[in-house]
Image (cartoon, rainbow, N blue to C red):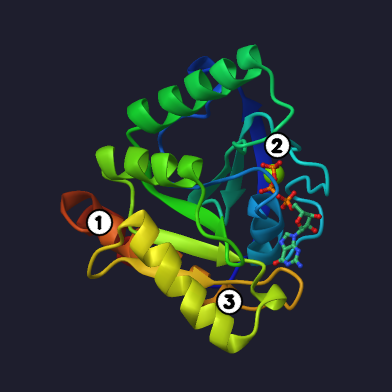
Amino acid sequence: MIIRKAEFISSAVDPRQYPDTSLPEIAFAGRSNVGKSSLINLLMNRKNLAKVSSTPGKTRTVNFFDINGSFRIVDLPGYGYAKLSKAETERWGKMMESYLSGRENLIKVFQLVDIRHEPTAQDVQMYEWLKYYGLSGVVIATKSDKVSRNEMNRNKAVISRKLGLEAGDRIIPVSALKRSGTDDVLDLIEQLLAGEGDGPEAETAEENAQNS
Ligand SMILES: Nc1nc2c(ncn2[C@@H]2O[C@H](COP(=O)(O)OP(=O)(O)OP(=O)(O)O)[C@@H](O)[C@H]2O)c(=O)[nH]1
Ligand SMILES: [Mg+2]
């Protein structure tokens, strides 16, 4: 996939602030500091599209990005941030729940986990949530520059077992530092978007393309 355009659209805390549902969306979820925003910048080949910080809790809202005018990437606020107050945790839960449960144009949520560590209880809970909403199946293991190839394979197996991945599910190692893994993620996004196009709407889109 060639990224011709990647543009920030809006930040939302509430469904009323979401953009319209005309484009399919793929969201990135994961623990705070796992590297969601870094990966989005890497995929889009842009330094500061999504805000990155070494301090956990940088992304506090649901952030929408328009890609090529044909789909959206959604940067979700991280969880498991130690300093989060009870009120903030509740706010996070509400924000996530309303996005995950009610977003008709959301086709997949990529779950990011740190390749160095066994998934936390919250990672497992998040992934269960995605399963419940039919949005699971893609796990991205970040910071692969921090482990050897042997460790990578071993840790992938641990992550896979702990999250309960099934046949056909994917686990993709990436490194924002070494800029690796992006082609795999972009190819997968392309496949997901193509699959989304099955059915009558895709035919219409194809016809439109042929007619133009
Ligand atoms: N070594 C290494 N560091 C990374 C990688 N990806 C991200 N980081 C670093 O991890 C820190 C957190 O990255 P972010 O992209 O802001 O993480 P996030 O998941 O968006 O965090 P929140 O917005 O708090 O939810 C930053 O200091 C990044 O530079 C990676 O692949 N390798
Ligand atoms: Mg972030």
Residue at mark 1: 202
Identify the residue at horizontal 32%, vertical 64% (top origin): 194
Q: Quadrant of residue 38?
A: bottom right
| Amino acid under disc 3 | Gly
Q: Within 10 Å of the Cα at label 1, are there few (<14), some (14-19), or many (20+) other Cα atoms?
A: some
Cα distance between the residues tagged 1 and 3: 29 Å
| Image quarter of the C terminus | bottom left
Quadrant observed for ligand 2 in the rendered image: top right
- The residue sitting at the top extreme is 87
Is 49 positioned to the left or the right of 151 in the image? right
The numbered dot on residue 88 is none
Is 144 positioned to the left or the right of 172 in the image? right
Residue 180 visible within the image: yes
Cα distance between the residues tagged 2 and 3: 23 Å
The numbered dot on residue 59 is 2
Say which of 89 and 45 sits in front.
Answer: 89
Identify the residue at horizontal 64%, vertical 78% (top origin): 180
Q: Which mark's residue is nearer the viewer, 2 or 1? A: 2
Residue at mark 3: 181
Say which of 207 and 203 sits in front.
Answer: 203
Q: Within 10 Å of the Cα at label 2, are there few (<14), some (14-19), or many (20+) other Cα atoms?
A: many
Q: Where residue 34 appears, x then y in whole percent?
A: 65, 53
Is 26 positioned to the left or the right of 195 in the image? right
Identify the residue at horizontal 63%, vertical 52% (top origin): 36
Confirm if mark 2 falls within 8 A of ligand 2: yes
